[in-house]
Image (cartoon, grey):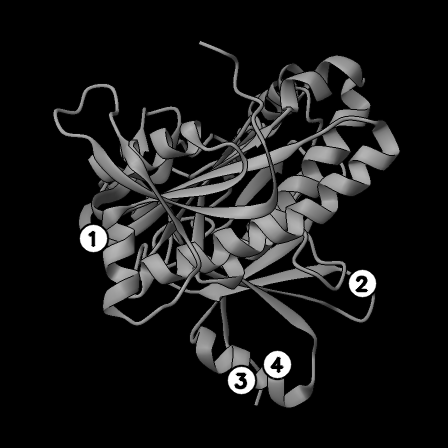
Amino acid sequence: MPIKVLDLHHHAIRVSPVPAEADATRDFYGRVLGLQPDPGRPAIPGVPGYWLNSGAHAQVHLIGAQGTLIDLGGGIDPSLPHVAFAVEDIAAALGELGRLGIEHRVLSGAVGAGSEQVFLRDPAGNLIELHQAGSCRCTAASRAGEQPGYTRVWSAVMFADMRGFTGLSERLSPTDVVPLLNEYFSLLTDIAVGHGGTVLNLAGDGLMAGFGVPKERRDAPECAVDSAREMLDRFGGLAAEWKQRHGFDTGIGIGINAGEVIAGNVGSPAYTSYTIIGDTVNVAARLSQRARAGEALFSSAVKRSLDEHGHSVPVIELPALQLRGRAEPVEIYCIPAARRVDFRPLA
């Protein structure tokens, strides 16, 4: 039975990754075709992009990317030019694709709370996206009337940052650095999503992900810890390749915390994105900053959840850490990789 498509949702077009050139393309669509920007759409962090309203339902998405931005496997990158349809029942659509044996990939949580995008190719190789009608800003009326909503949710928060990136940037040209960053972010995002995480931000050489966001799950800390262990292991192999190819050392430091966060769309009238905020997030960020390359540091809240669920992970208990702005020290634990390097500057 054919998948029931309700509307054409958007057409994604790649434009220059240079902000000024991306802006010029946006201005062309406004000046020549009269398409007006939709400021309520979440953007891809660090990537110039604009959503332009086109009629009662459809939009045009200008994405300022070059090369592979997100690798879902099977040659599918959702930032490539594609046409997107809103369908009546995304679960039924997935079932039909499976019945027909059509290869597809699913991207969850990338464009907002509860979002689920399904990507496939037609016989001519064109990329197609399907998503549940009503799960996002599917009509001009909903875009005009939408108010930012905020939800309290118990989750685990992870920050991962590359160590040695400054030296890497100084020694290589930007055209050499960008492919390395794409390798790095592709690896980390694939791992986070594979463990049920939602990638909330990519900036510089850092990644922020939530586990149990937007849908709460009690095993969120275990998912985050398993994700961190896989990141440390697999990035070790990638760092070894970079060392052989370019002669520099790199590593990742990870921080994880668990607790209540506020989830919702945050920003200005010109730019908004779905994210999480709160003390739980701040502590995770601080732990990431303290971690050496090859370490994942996590709080006692995460350790308590691991113990309660019988999730055995080899860890090292470290002395309590006094974080700036907090009255009491934070109990911390460490998951070490086989090799650790301290890139932090001496105080």
Mark 2 and mark 4: Cα distance apart in space: 16 Å
Looking at the rendered structure, which numbered label has been put on residue 125?
A: 2
**Where does residue 284 sit, x and y in percent of width and height?**
33, 37
Identify the residue shown where x is 46% and y is 60%.
226
Q: Amino acid at mark 4?
A: Leu
Using the image as rendered, state which of residue 288 and residue 79 is in the foreground.
288
Mark 4 and mark 3: Cα distance apart in space: 5 Å
What residue is disc 4 on? 97
Looking at the rendered structure, which numbered label has been put on residue 95?
A: 3
Q: Amino acid at mark 3?
A: Gly
Q: Is residue 38 visible?
A: yes
Q: Earlier in the sequence, mark 2 or mark 4?
A: 4
Whether pointer 4 and pointer 3 mark residues with C-beta atoms closer than 8 Å, the reply is: yes
Compared to 196, does 29 lie above or below?
above
Q: Amino acid at mark 2?
A: Gly
**Where does residue 52 sit, x and y in percent of width and height?**
51, 36
